[in-house]
Amino acid sequence: MTRQTSKSKPVLEIENLCTVFHAEDGAWPAINGLSLTLQAGEVLGLVGESGSGKSVAGFSVMGLIDHPGEIVSGSVRLKGRDLREMSEEELRRIRGSEMAMIFQDPLTTLNPVLTIGEQMAETIFEHRSDISKATINDRCVELLRKVGITSPAARLEQYPHELSGGMRQRIAIAIALLNNPDLIIADEPTTALDVTIQGQIIAEMQALQAESGTALIWITHDLAVVSELADRVAVMYAGDIVEQGTTDEILDDPRHPYTIGLLASVPGDAIPGEPLHQISGMAPSLAARPAGCSFHPRCERASDLCREKDPAPTSDGNGRMWRCHHPVQASPATDGEAER
Amino acid sequence: MSIDLHTTPSSPPIIELEQIGRVFTRSPVAAERLLSLFGRDPEIPVLRAVRAVDLSVQRGEVLGLVGESGCGKSTLGRIVTGILPASSGKLSYEGQDVQTLTAQEKKRYTLSVQMIFQDPYASLNPRQKVGDILAEPLKVHGLAKGRSQIKERVRDALLEVGLDPAYADRYPHQFSGGQRQRIGIARALIVEPDFLVCDEPIAALDVSIQAQVINLFLELRTRRALTYLFISHDLSVVRHIADRVAIMYLGEIVELAPAADLFASPAHPYTQTLLDQIPSVRNRKRKFHAVKGELPSPLSPPSGCAFHPRCPHATERCRNEAPSLVSIAPGRTASCHLVKESK
């Protein structure tokens, strides 16, 4: 659906991926037929609110869905190989070497009883047992320096609790980069950090990404962060990607009413003191997704069609996609926001 | 926009802080106590969370308080509400030192200054029904008599924050984050306060829910003529809601200005840095020029100006001599050696 006519082979192709969570009263789909393609060196912003399925999408790609979750259909191909057909052993070899993940809270993802050096060495050793201790040490120091950590050799001896939140996140990034992966999935990596530290991390990720050519999926709820970082944006709502395109297309010319609502509800350009545009209601829970288009109860443009039929994706053939029966028309001359 | 509506020049500020400070320390361990018995006082580290802050809040205004984690903004908010006593300095409510208030005046101060907390999951008792959570302050302070009156006040409070009165019989876990924050707001409003200290009230909420809660704050302000101390690390939210903004760094206020002026022409290098770091949907693939370093530990603050190790313009003087807050334009103050004082 979203396949692009590009000369290079995509790093990641997700097709029709469905991940459900089993409960006593049935299996609830957290993501529902997700399709996504990522080219080498591309930065994709995956945007959505809590419960939209954006993190589950990341975990599904990494093969980290445990019971009661289950990937029930679809395919995830990393450089052409289907990850869903691999054994756990094969996946282990790929995770941490060809693809890596950075999580939101580095305090819970770093092991508190191992030194930074031990955890970093483990990541290399797991994948390349022939390597000498001295080489591993050099590599760790090199990467810590790259992510902007001062006196890296001394840090290797320290434990996670001795470091600040920003430092810990840098270490998590360094660990993700250790084996030069082709794909990094970063799940809200700066949400827990202060703006100045967020700025530092984004700056370093930009530089590292440009240097290494790693493809990056940046999962976030913050459209502003995405606009600073991403080549393309996919907006998720209730388990589906509702709109996808280049960053400029999504932010300057959104077609889906949810994207428009999200953009209008951040205070950026609003007149101070005036009410902000708000999307009424809240995102549906997994067990209570409405029939038809899942956004229709909150949508100003909803019609009977939206209440009955889930919209199929519309594509413009250039990687631009939206799922809406009544997309907002692109208006090249006048700014669409003027009518509000 | 509405400061002038509520303030007459003669009325004292609703809250005034003079040289307010707060230190945290630990009690000496056995060995240290032994040492002091022998006349050798051990060195126990002292954390100065808030250092000599002067600040006044006028009736009817929204004062934004901005800073990074660990700068002391929440401690300051707690001091204002009286939850946490200050270690030094003077806190006045409507021109009167709170230390000298009579029991009855003290009750009026406590009721009229209410707090809204960041985490709506942690600040509501999970074992109480929402109706009981809201009724408790009424009962404790004897503000409503009889079941029916309490029930009516609870009903009105829920309606006011946009919740269904039937929710009174539910428990907090049955609500979403945004709804819980509304319950927190209803609990603060039920004692009819004049002044709300809002400590990061929307930081834990989703984007589309943040807009709803910001709108609720704006609405309540107009309807009830409330005054807010709005504590946040999110500058774009503060810009939207605040009349004046105070920027805090390592326990001190480094700049104070009307919101429009502050965002148009930030004076202090730290404020400039913060503004540069706000991500915006207008920027595409911007090259970030990140500020170096992190907020220093308040246990061992740097010499001179606390910001000098991170400041791109720091001079020899900044390293040795701490600047003080001086007036730089009408209604604006900043503490930086590089900013010119105006009289």
Image: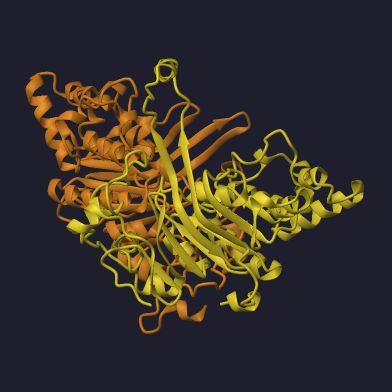
Is the image coloured rainbow, by chain, by secondary structure, or in one colour? by chain
Identify whether A194 is placed above or below B211: above
Q: Is residue B67 visible?
A: yes
Q: Position of residue B138 (x, y in %)?
A: 80, 48
Residue occupying the point 11% across, 31% down: A139
Q: Looking at this view, is A332 or A47 the one in front?
A: A47
Q: Position of residue B236 (x, y in %)?
A: 43, 63
Which quadrant of the view contains residue B222? bottom right
The tint of chain B in the picture is: yellow
Q: Where is residue A184 in the image (x, y as percent from the top left)?
A: 26, 41
Identify whether B237 is placed above or below A22: below
Q: Looking at this view, is B79 or A178 the one in front?
A: B79
Q: Looking at this view, is B115 or B152 the one in front?
A: B115
Left or right: residue B121 versus residue A50 is right
Q: Looking at this view, is A244 or B251 the one in front?
A: B251
Residue occupying the point 70% across, 69% down: B223
Left or right: residue A309 versus residue B294 is right
Question: Residue extending furthest bottom?
Answer: A333
Q: Is residue B204 visible?
A: no
Identify whether B64 is placed above or below B148: below
Q: Position of residue B181 (x, y in %)?
A: 62, 50
Which quarter of the rendered picture does the C terminus of chain B lie within? bottom left
Left or right: residue B236 versus residue B194 is left
- Which lettered chain is shown in orange? A
Count how many numbered circles sit on residues in the image: 0
Which quarter of the rendered picture does the N terminus of chain B lie within? bottom right
Residue occupying the point 58% across, 30% down: A23
Residue occupying the point 19% across, 45% down: A214
